[in-house]
Amino acid sequence: MKHCWSILLLAFLCSSITAQDEIHNIQTKISAAQQQLLQDSFFSPSYRLLAPLKYQLRSIADSSARKLDLQFQLYDTYLEVVNGMIASTINPESKKLAYRKELPAFETGIATAYQLFQQKADDQYFQWAFHTAEQNRNLLLSNSLYTPISMPDHTESELGRLLSAINIAKSKLTNAKRQNNQSQIVSLENLRDSLKSIYNQQMEQIAPWPKLSDLDENNAFEWDSIQSKLQPKEALIEYFYGRDSVYVFVLTAHSKTFQNLASAKSIQLLIQSFQQSIYHQKENWYQANTQLYQLLFHPIRSFLTDTDKLIIVPDGILGAIPFQSLCPEAEEWDRSFKTLDYLIYHYDIHYHHSAKALFQEKPAPIFEPNALALAPVFDSTAQIVKDSIPKNLNALPLTPQLLKNIKRHYRGHYLTHASANFYKFSQEAPHADIIHFSTHTLLHPNIPMYTQIMLYPTSTSSAALQLKDIYLMAGQLNCDLAVLGSCQSGSGPISEGESLSGLAYGFSYLGVPSLIYSLWAVDENATNQLFSQFYAYLKKGRDKSSALREAQIQYLQQANEETAAPFFWAGFILTGQNQAYTFQQQNPTNLWWWFAGSIVLIVLIFTQKTKIWAALNPSLRI
């Protein structure tokens, strides 16, 4: 029961608060509680013991500056405990459940910091809110930690205690850096590194499960450190989607803002309307799209006047819309999709799982990437092999031509019809830098793990590459870019704190640095046009987001007033790293010499043949 004392101490702290308590006395008690937390770092507290503290926190709802400061301090301490509990949980579903259970506390803490930031313009409240929004974002993707089935219970418990201790040491280190306490910084860094070393030693025994990164995660939370990483015309836009409100953090190289945008319910209803009307309901889509622009983007646009590249970190259901297609309301819309002022015309936009991803070490540029592209086609020949193709699966007759277009630019393996099967994929995928699927996705309505990428059926392998199969490939895939060029490859139920779902989630979990996936059921012809141009621009040395943007703009320029609808071009988005590839450049001088040499060779061959022919036919000599 020793590990429960930290929680009981915090509960006592809240129960002792009265209107006469002085702020500095409360801060002293909080400091004592935090010291106790650090001493009891190997603990696994019960949620039941947090209940008294949570009740007292809810009772402190006075908006006066005095109570607001107190509320902020208490939530700071409370969430430190909660984060320790979440970090100590190995099982991924338990992590998400813990976060969902405590989401109201995270949101109230951010709301309190927001009010104080508005009142005092003190950067510590911006930093705290930003840190809190990032703390448990995309829990599974951030930790990349699934529990091996064979992990003994005592090993899981020990790893949980280690993670809890590491998390608390990191939190204390952040506070020490904020206060510039050099002696604490040194001791806490040593403590953190020692604990991480112990953790990694234990993880080596259950390889291939990943270790903790050597990255100093606390630096990834500092907004000024992020600013130093941003290019002059680049901005980071990070959203926090709570149960009551939606907040946004904006960082450019020289400025920042933190805003409460709108109620979460209003945003949710608009996104649902956007999704339902994207196919055929022109007026409904236009209203939803322009209102989403007004709520999510217009309030921050004035901070982006010198910006042309946006890195967006969505949250929850915000990950289901392409910001490229948002646009302001036209003065008089003529119902032509071609006349709308989409954000894609103004910004190069791509997405990240979290701001922490910006600080991950970027992989070395890949020279002449090797591609693996699969197009099962699903024409009538598929039925001859095995009668397991769902009857509602349409043929994709244009996809072989797309693979031919890609093959013009990239070496690799291009598998169509019967060769695009599970066995061939499992053989070739570990050697590919780029993996491209031109096929169908089948969403499972109840069990996301059974969502499928459809491949060609054989007598020995299934027609489906399921999400659970992707998870089992941990440690095997080394690709830099996965293009899920199928319908709804990024669709599925989105958990609170997550921004990805479905097949896209699976590939991100395996550590694929860059993903392109679809948000709805896409049009085959438009998709083939889009990716033919995307790979051509990528070959010209564009980074991934620029290549996708230029391909989408080129499509828009060639489209008519109906086919310029976002349904045709905006369904695919890029998430993750954004590096360009390098290719062998042909020297124009060398090309000229090659051409001249070829002409000389042709002349010599022709002359030689003429002499031989004349020698064999002396009667034709003059």
Image (cartoon, helix red, strand yellow):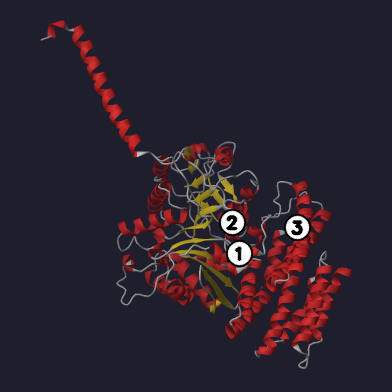
Tell me how many marks there are: 3
How many C-alpha atoms fall within 10 Å of the one at disc 3: few (<14), some, or many (≥20)?
some
When asked about the image quadrant of residue 399, the answer is: top left
Is 516 positioned to the left or the right of 552 in the image? right
Q: Secondary structure at mark 1?
A: loop
> Label 1 to label 3, Cα distance in Å?
28 Å
- Farthest residue to the left: give it: 622
Q: Nearer the viewer, residue 286 or 347?
A: 347
> On residue 193, which mark appears?
3
Are the residues tagged 2 and 1 within 8 Å (C-beta)? yes
**Residue visible at 31% across and 32% down in the picture:** 593
Are the residues tagged 1 and 3 within 8 Å (C-beta)? no
Residue at which label 1 appears:
498
> Label 3 to label 2, Cα distance in Å?
30 Å
Residue at which label 2 appears:
505
Estimate the x, y position of residue 112 in percent, counting from the top left: 64, 81
Nearer the observer: mark 3 or 2; the answer is 3
The quadrant in which the C terminus is found is top left
How many C-alpha atoms fall within 10 Å of the one at disc 2: few (<14), some, or many (≥20)?
many
